[in-house]
Image (cartoon, rainbow, N blue to C red):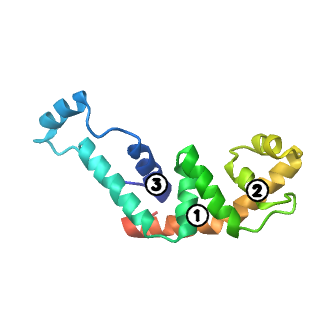
Amino acid sequence: MFKHAEQALRFAFRMREKPLVSRTNLASCEADRSSQTLTAHDFHAQAGMVFSFLERQPLHQQAYAYLMFGSPQERDAAASVLSVDLAVPKHLKSRAELKNALLTKTVRDCAKSLGISNYKAWRTKQTIHGLLEPIALRLYDAVEGWFGIQE
């Protein structure tokens, strides 16, 4: 069903935001019972299984998934968890700045948020990427192993 782990995680977080039952959905569910296509219930069940798997992973891997795909409130909480244990890059002064850097999407946003030059923001984002990469790879390997995804 999924080609890679990131697709599975993105799918689960996206499906979580969609309603399970709607008026048009009820009519299509009745029509689809005889066919072999997946219904909205099947998609939500798949997303639930992904979240169940994610809950059994180490805290840093959970935080990484919520930082990448979660809502703004979840991203904030995940950045708080990750900023406690990650090493603070040399361009930053505190863990609060590290948390703000984790929450920014682009280099320019990072520079604006922290009041540093674009070059320092780029170096900071590059360092943060290097710190998060092992966590991401462990999570993606675990998801691919669980789903049996082979490249």
Residue at 27% x, 42% y is 40
Q: How many marks?
A: 3
First-in-chain label (1 vs 2): 2
Residue at 71% x, 67% y is 86
Element at label 1: helix
Question: Residue furthest toward the top?
Answer: 24
The amino acid at mark 1 is: Ala
Is residue 23 visible from the viewing direction of this image? yes
Mark 3 and mark 1 in contact? Answer it, CB < 8 Å. no
Q: Which mark is residue 76?
A: none
Residue marked by disc 2: 96
Element at label 2: helix
Classify residue 59 by image quadrant.
bottom right
Residue 47 image point, x, y percent: 36, 53
Element at label 3: helix
The amino acid at mark 2 is: Ala
Residue 109 image point, x, y percent: 76, 41
Cα separation between marks 3 and 2: 27 Å
Mark 3 and mark 2 in contact? Answer it, CB < 8 Å. no
Residue marked by disc 1: 136
Residue 130, placed above or below residue 47 = below
Residue marked by disc 3: 9
Q: Nearer the viewer, residue 115 or 35?
A: 115
The amino acid at mark 3 is: Leu
Mark 1 and mark 2 in contact? Answer it, CB < 8 Å. no
Is residue 148 visible from the viewing direction of this image? no
